[in-house]
Amino acid sequence: MQETAIGLVALGNGVPELVLKIIAAHIEGYLNLSTVQLKSLQLPASCLDERRLQYDAGKLLQYLEEQPFEGCSKIIGVLGGDLFVPIFTHVFGEARQGGGHALVSLHRLFHSEAGTPCPEPLAYERAAKVALHETCHLFDLLHCQDQDCLMHFSDDIPALDALPINFCPYCTQYINDACRRMGIAKKVLF
């Protein structure tokens, strides 16, 4: 079995170095997968929807897929800008189910629902939750019906805050099996 790395790449300005380190620590600590921080990339203007003033998650994922990342089996792009998919007003993150690329948007994570700044530790926890959730989608996990599982769908800040940083037994087993199938000798640590 081979070691694998999850590549973390900052997209554009507005991604604090500390956030990348926190995301890396959570992926390594909770999923027992190695991470590596990659050189940052600019956000392409072609991915910005001028009408919505948000980045199109599908276009941004396609942009990441076109980049020559080496030595990483999966890539997570982290951006300060707001993300959307056509059926939602916004998303905190997006991933190609079972694919190689995911996104985490910090735009809404550093504020309350009313738009006021939130304490930094809470924002960091939110970023870690979204990154873990999207990473698991890359390993083909679907949304979970268990409201006490990190793979449960959350579409707003209160729902995200209510999620524990924990996986249900089913999702834990699934991610372990997925890693084994991919030749990654790892076990989720809880």
Image: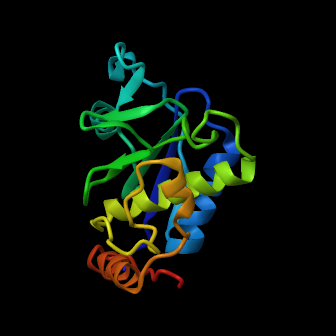
Q: In this view, does 69 lie to the left or right of 158?
A: left
Q: Residue at x 57, y 51 (%)?
A: 127
- Where residue 74 appears, as percent x and y from the top left, is 38, 55
In the figure, 153 relative to 82: above or below?
below
Rendering quarter of residue 149: bottom left
- Where residue 39 appears, as percent x and y from the top left, is 54, 38
Residue reaching furthest to the front: 114
Q: Which residue is drawn at 47% across and 52% down?
A: 7
In the figure, 177 relative to 99: above or below?
below
Q: Which residue is drawn at 31% across and 82% down?
A: 177
Q: Is residue 61 visible?
A: yes
User: In the picture, which quadrant includes the N terminus?
Assistant: bottom left
Nearer-the-camera pick, 152 or 28 = 152
Q: How many labels does the image show?
A: 0
Q: Which residue is drawn at 34% across and 84% down?
A: 170
- Where residue 153 appears, as percent x and y from the top left, is 37, 59
Nearer-the-camera pick, 117 or 180 = 117
Q: Is residue 67 left or right of residue 43?
A: left
In the figure, 157 relative to 40: above or below?
below
- Where residue 173 appears, as percent x and y from the top left, is 36, 85
In the figure, 178 relative to 27: above or below?
below
